[in-house]
Amino acid sequence: MLTLALIGLIGGLVTGISPCILPVLPVIFLSGAQGAAVQRARPYLVIAGLVASFTLVTLFGSLLLSLLGLPQDVLRWAGLVVLALIGIGLLVPRFEQLLGKPFSLIPQRRPDANRGGFGLGLALGAVYVPCAGPVLAAITVAGSTGRIGVDTVVLTVTFAVGAAIPLLFFALAGRQVTERLRAFRKRQRGIRVAAGVLMLALAVGLVFNLPQLLQRTVPDYTTGLQERIDDSEEVREALGLGGLENEQNKDLDRCSADATELESCGTAPDVRGIQQWLNTPGNRAVDLKSLRGKVVLLDFWAYSCINCQRSIPHVTAWDAAYRDAGLRVIGVHAPEYAFEKESRNVAAAVGKFGIRYPVALDNSLATWTNYRNRYWPAHYLVDAQGTVRHIKFGEGDYDVTERLIRELLADADPEVSLPKPTDTADDTPDVRAITRETYLGSTKRVNFAGAQPYTAGERAFDFPGDQPKDSFALAGGWALTTQHITPTGPSGQVRLAYRAREVRMVLSGAGTVTYEAGGRTRTIRVAGTPDSYQLLSTQDIAAGTVTVTVGAGVRAYSFTFG
């Protein structure tokens, strides 16, 4: 618990001093200056309101809106409206009185128009929740998909407090300026007008995403700190979805990942929160309890994941070989990317890979979280009594998994006649010998070798003079989003230094991608939904460099390696 609190506080502090909060600083400063002579607590009220709305919206906003069937940006728009109304009220006192009429019915010992600090903080917190940063990724998933526990609340609150501390200093600075300088005390009306103008400007700017221009202009001086937090093994372990423990999954710790013998790890958690089922009669849901007496293999996968693509032939072979002997396979499709949530894309991949067993579309990662999973692919083997007996993360060791499947089938029915073991080739590469999967989105990127900040927005890049192995760099104008990158001009270049036998690139949109391989220039025509395109293939693992020119209209998501 203490570790989570420290992670949340440190992550919040880093976010609180990042360029993300620059657009709101003038509003925070003037909120402390306005009315300071009569209300010394106003800065604290503003920050308290911000922390409260930040925490509540982050934890419960997505879940509440989903239950009500409302768009996910409703709370942000509500915050913008409140911010604009407060700004108008500061400019037009009569309008402020009109806004305050509903509250005049509430008995107050000392009515004061300046006591709107907490409401202003609530509006700012709702508006700036999307600026939470990478540490809150696990909390966002927990709030929208899984049960929110004490650990999640502690992490969220400490993050909110950490992010608010730098803002509190600015609010207190505004109060101090007002109290110390007589000119400020005499110009409270002017301060109110300035605050109103700034709030309206902020609201309008947020509508058109203008603060992003400021954030792109100012170098992200916190990038190094953010990367240290994100790359820390302790932070990953504490924030990973594997840390979301509940009554159903608490015994999964009894299983040691990649064990070579059967273990006993508690009753299999529910398959829950599924948006749609494929390959079932009438697309009806499958209940694990209805499969008691059968051996069940749950395969967590994502269709664009190259590791999953290498694993699927083994899973389909087991399904075909052992279905009549009592094996039931359930594919749990847990998307890495937003485009993988589209059921038609998953259905096409199911057909392409020859999957005949039921597939659950776990778009909200509810089942993924309930199994405390962290990997693509991941296999959970459940015996005929409904107990988890084996967990395998990642590729490889297919002979071990198949041997354990055969043991459980024989335990369930000693009279069963088992076929010969399958002979599907194991194409799992030595991960130490090849480049790791390289994401290009701003929040998932790894291995970036450029000197420029790699954050969401539009900016120009240059190739570095010396690029290390297992890295990528950009040249030209690019628009970076959390999921993908796309050129802002006619084209942009990506230079990749790799070690692999096969190099593939996940692309979508409409356009061309050209690259040099084997002394020849090759062109790929990209059309439609995201798919994996092969760039290079050699007989043995080799090191090399490839420069890819991505044309306008093409979105690049990642490089994968084999």
Image (tube, rainbow, N blue to C red):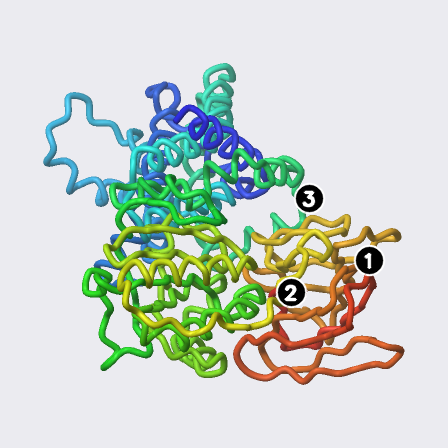
Question: Quadrant of residue 405 in the image?
Answer: bottom left
The residue sitting at 28% across, 78% down in the picture is 280
The disc at residue 344 is none
- Callout 2 environment at 10 Å: few (<14), some (14 to 19), or many (20+)? many
In the picture shown, does residue 398 fall above or below 45? below
Check disc 2 and give the amino acid type.
Thr
Q: Which residue is mark 3?
A: 219
Residue most toward the top?
A: 180
Q: Which residue is mark 1?
A: 463
In the picture shown, does residue 552 fall above or below 36? below
Check disc 1 and give the amino acid type.
Phe
Query: Which is more toward the observer, 558 or 189?
Result: 558
The disc, 2 or 3, on the residue closer to the chain's N-terminal end is 3
Label 2 and label 1: CA atoms lie apart by 21 Å
In the picture shown, does residue 167 fall above or below 316? above
In the picture shown, does residue 375 fall above or below 139? below
For the residues carrying marks 1 and 3, which lies nearer the camera in this image?
1
Secondary structure found at label 3: loop
Asked whether disc 2 touches disc 1, contact meaning CB atoms under 8 Å apart, the reply is no
Measured as percent of width and height from the top left, residue 311 is found at 53, 67
Asked whether disc 1 touches disc 3, contact meaning CB atoms under 8 Å apart, the reply is no
The residue sitting at 58% across, 67% down in the picture is 306
- Callout 3 environment at 10 Å: few (<14), some (14 to 19), or many (20+)? some
Q: Which residue is mark 2?
A: 560
- Callout 1 environment at 10 Å: few (<14), some (14 to 19), or many (20+)? some
Quadrant placement of the C terminus: bottom right
The disc, 2 or 1, on the residue closer to the chain's N-terminal end is 1
Residue 117 appears in the figure: no
